[in-house]
Each structure stands twice: as structure tokens, then as C-alpha cells.
Amino acid sequence: MCLALPARIVALVDADNAIVDLGGVRKQVSITLVPEVCVGDYVIVHVGYAIGTLDEAEAQATLALFGELARTAA
């Protein structure tokens, strides 16, 4: 099963990489597939690559669903 998570861009490292924040965890990811992203944008991250963009409302709704799932699975 594959899983991609929404994360917010917090810094651009260079033309091909950015730092994202996902629930307080920061990680460098490749933005080669979404070169138009800016700090503050939300991207979908899969295996270290930003594979798409999404708006903040959609990102927050998805993160809330993941949070609910985590609470019910515990």
C-alpha cells in the first residue's frame, strides 16, 4: 500500500529541494515534480518527493482525517 501525506513548504533549499513540515516533523524533499511551489504552499509528499500541490483547506481536512484515524487506532 502506498501513502502520500500533505505537508507545508517551510523553506526552499534550492531549485530542486525544499523543507516541509508535517505535524512538527521537518524533512527535506524533492520538488522537481512541482517546481512552481512557494513557501507556505501545501504539497503531497510520497517517498521523499513532492508529487503534487493542494490548497490549504484540502490539506487541513486530510490531516484532520489522518489525526482521527490515529486516535481511533490507538
Image: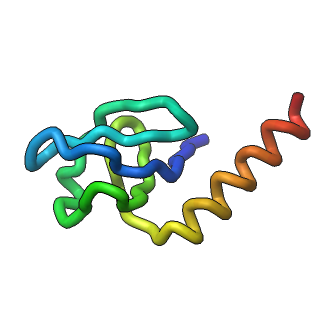
| Displayed quadrant of residue 70 | top right
Q: Where in the figure is residue 22, as x and y percent of width and height?
A: 51, 40
| Displayed quadrant of residue 46 | top left
Residue at point 67%, 63% (across, down): 61
23 in relation to 5, above or below? above
In the visual, does 25 lie left or right of 61? left
Q: Where in the figure is residue 21, as x and y percent of width and height?
A: 44, 40
In the visual, does 42 lie left or right of 14? right
5 in relation to 74, above or below? below
Q: Where in the figure is residue 27, as x and y percent of width and height?
A: 37, 31
Could you tell me how many numbered marks the image carries? 0
Q: Quadrant of the N terminus?
A: top right
The type of colouring in the image is: rainbow
Residue at point 36%, 61% (across, down): 41
| Displayed quadrant of residue 43 | bottom left
Could you say which is closer to the camera, residue 47 or residue 22?
22
Q: In which quarter of the image is the C terminus?
A: top right
Residue at point 18%, 51% (across, down): 32
In the visual, does 24 lie left or right of 36? right
Could you say which is closer to the camera, residue 58 or residue 4?
58
70 in relation to 7, above or below? above
Q: Where in the figure is residue 39, as x and y percent of width and height?
A: 28, 55
